[in-house]
Image (tube, rainbow, N blue to C red):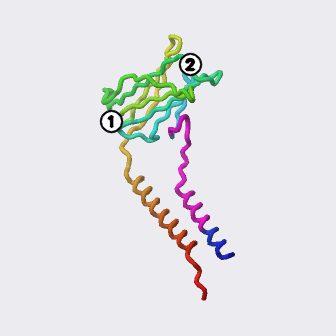
Amino acid sequence: MLANLSKLNIIYLVIFAILLIFWNYDHVEAHGGVTVFKKQVIGPYEIQFGTSPRSPSPGPIHVALRIVSVQSGLPLNESTVQLSGRILNLDGDSISSFEPIFADQFMDAPEFWDVDIIVAAEGNWSFKVVIENSGKLHEAYYGVKVQESSPIVGIFSVIGLIIFLIVLALAVRTYFKPNRPG
């Protein structure tokens, strides 16, 4: 019995060690989008800007904005929020851009505003957030580096998953293997 208990403890330790190795330290904000926010205070508002994926590549990008009053911490109501973006070449000419898009306020968490965009080119993008409230405009600018993602991360993730499943299968097999006397 004691030998089986020690085998069980070893299995738990192996599983715990593997989980620690592959643990993802991102945090979840808003309504489930995994983002890290960049914060600015513009006029009476604190504006936080985050993208999902965190390191975007050309293609679809989800932008989450968290906008609250600096004084009260309350979310915006009866306001419009727009997002636009562009990328400039070395001469200052626009390589690629998109016109202002209205952000949608998330009803379950009214301090969050969401917009889905498609970015066509790699480079250092400048995103402009415009808040219109009671006829007053407030603008914030955020820089985001858009680059092609490396497939190496995905390859290592698959290899890690396969190794984890092999170790788990061997641990289960060892645990349930009948003890032979003698």
Which residue lies under the disc numbered 1?
Answer: 121
Q: Quadrant of residue 97?
A: top left
Identify the residue shown where x is 41% and y is 29%.
126
Residue 53 position (above or below residue 165) = above
Screen quadrant of the N terminus = bottom right
The magenta stretch spans residue 14: yes
Residue 134 position (above or below residue 125) = above
Q: Position of residue 70 (x, y in %)?
A: 62, 23
Q: Is residue 116 visible?
A: yes
Which residue lies under the disc numbered 2?
Answer: 77
Query: What's drawn in magenta, residue-wise?
Result: 11-33
Q: Of helix, strand and loop, which one carries label 1?
A: loop
**The label number, if any, that marks residue 99 in the structure image:** none
Q: Nearer the viewer, residue 182 or 75?
A: 182
User: Farthest residue toward the top?
Assistant: 135
Look at discs 2 and 1 and give the one toward the viewer.
Answer: 2
Q: Quadrant of residue 13?
A: bottom right
Q: CA distance from mark 2 to mark 1?
A: 34 Å
Q: Position of residue 86 (x, y in %)?
A: 36, 28
- Answer few, some or many: residues within 10 Å of disc 1's Cα (few below 14, many 20 plus, some between 14 and 19): some
